[in-house]
Image (spheres, coloured by chain):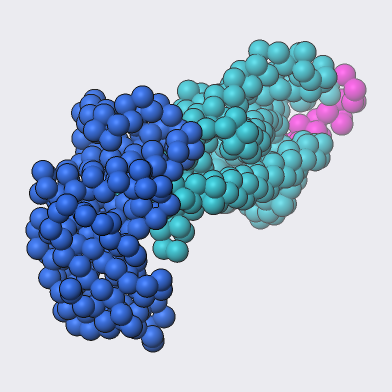
Chain colours: A cyan, B blue
Amino acid sequence: MSLNRFFSFSLPLIIMLFSFSIYISISKMITTYETTINNDYSIVLVTTTPITQDVIKKGISFNVKNLKTLSREQILADLRDDVTDGSFALLQTKLPYFYTLSLQEFPTSSSLEKLKKELLSIQGMKSVETFSKDHDNVYSLFLFIKSVSATMFAFMILFTLFIISNQINLWFYEHSERLHIINLHGGSLLYGAKPILKLALLSGLFAGIVVVGGIFYVQQNIDLIFSPELAQLITQSNIVYTPIEVVSIVLISLFISFATVFGVLIKHRFK
Amino acid sequence: MIHANNLCLSYDGKKDIIHNGKFHIQEKDFVFITGSSGSGKSTLLKSFYNGIKPKSGTLLVNNTNMLKVGKSKIRELRKNIGIIFQDYKLIKEYTVEENIMLPLKLNNYGDAKSLEQARKLLKHVKLSSKGHCMPDELSGGEQQRASVARALAHNPKLILADEPTGNLDDYSAELVWSLLRKANEQLGITVVVVTHRIPDNFGLSYRKFDILSGDIYES
């Protein structure tokens, strides 16, 4: 097995696995971001009559996490010193009811519009104030990066398949005489292809280990590798790979490697 | 061992190279197939290991019908045949020893047993000191003896040889003929050899098939 061929197998796999881990990391960042802003944001509801969580649940197509009542007394107390007695008495009778609504999932800008419409159609609903638009912009940016990384990952799979299958075809061409002699003696194509299967196994494992090692290295040295702002964002996002994800990276590497070899083997078998 | 009736062989399906061939090769026979260049003698030998599928007729090798045989059955058939070629067909990435071990490994002998048998055969073909050499480090005669050793390694019932001495000097050729004679005489292996010249004073009774214009004649 030449070192040259070993690396021509491993390198595309490593590049593909890194793009996969980037995709996983971004997905994790988005999930963490969603959780964070889900905890931070609230939708403020203003109603003319008291309202319950059940009424809200029935009126909208989103999963309600909770509905908190904002204390009218507290609001009135805050305003007490700023208005005259007459105005205060009027406020007491006219002041609407305030609530903060939280959802179980993070809504996008389009679903937020829909939510607002549904809330306003509930009887007694006077006004609905959604949260800052900044969150939505950041979220959209994250989603964009996620789709870019997913596209990149898909391209990398194609690139890897192309490079590896070319290498295997080259190997078959170089070893055609050996395969022919083995075939003349009753050996199967699979028997003749043992070296390339061994290469697929070793390079698949090597690529998986390199990428997993790379991920751990990056995790341990975030401050050294990234700018302080990005390092903070990554640390806050808590991108930790579970053992299952680590194993899945190695398995994907082996799967792609073997699938390509077997694909080419099948092609040669029916030639 | 080999039974042919109305056997027709053709590469393009139109022009017959062998036409209505009829013969019967018994176990322990030593058979020479002769004919002029391009007469179809190598093609006939090829058909015995399914290197070419018969166009029509009957061809039974080791009771395997070569007209209807599937890929896995071909593999089984070939595993039980020893084949020798004019150009030796040794695997250049393997050592001489590993080349001889190939049919043994394909027949599921263990590594240790394969190695033991390969070394025994290397001694038999007078190549004991060349086991670890690569084939291109050997002379033509030595390569052909290694090829004979490979053909004998797994004690096949049938050895097919296509011009085994075609590229060899007289001394090396005689060594190969003597190995084939011994295989037939002492081990009872059926040997079918394609050659354009049968050695003088062969020292063993044999049968001779002549191919002339696609027809097979026994003389």
Q: Residue at x 84, y 24 (%)?
A: A79
Q: Which residues are magenta?
A: A81-99
> Relative to residue A121, is residue B118 depicted above or below?
above
Locate the C terminus of chain A and report the quarter of the image it occupies.
Answer: bottom left
Q: Quadrant of residue A45?
A: top right
Q: Can residue B71 be seen from the camera position used here?
A: no
Residue A104 x %, y %:
57, 37
Q: Quadrant of residue B68?
A: bottom left
Residue B61 image offset from top left, x and y in percent: 17, 64
Outermost front residue: B201
Q: Quadrant of residue B60?
A: bottom left
A133 or A94, which lies in front? A133
Q: Nearer the viewer, residue A261 or B144?
A: B144
Rendered view: A15 above or below A118:
above
Q: Is residue B163 visible?
A: yes
Reply yes or no: does residue B191 show up in magenta: no
Which residue is painted at 35% across and 43% down in the image? B171
Give left or right: position of B157 versus A115.
left
Please state if A6 lies on the left or on the right of B88 as rendered.
Answer: right
Identify which residue is drawn at 72% across, 52% down.
A110
Can you give x and y, in whole percent of width and height, for residue A65 in the image?
56, 35
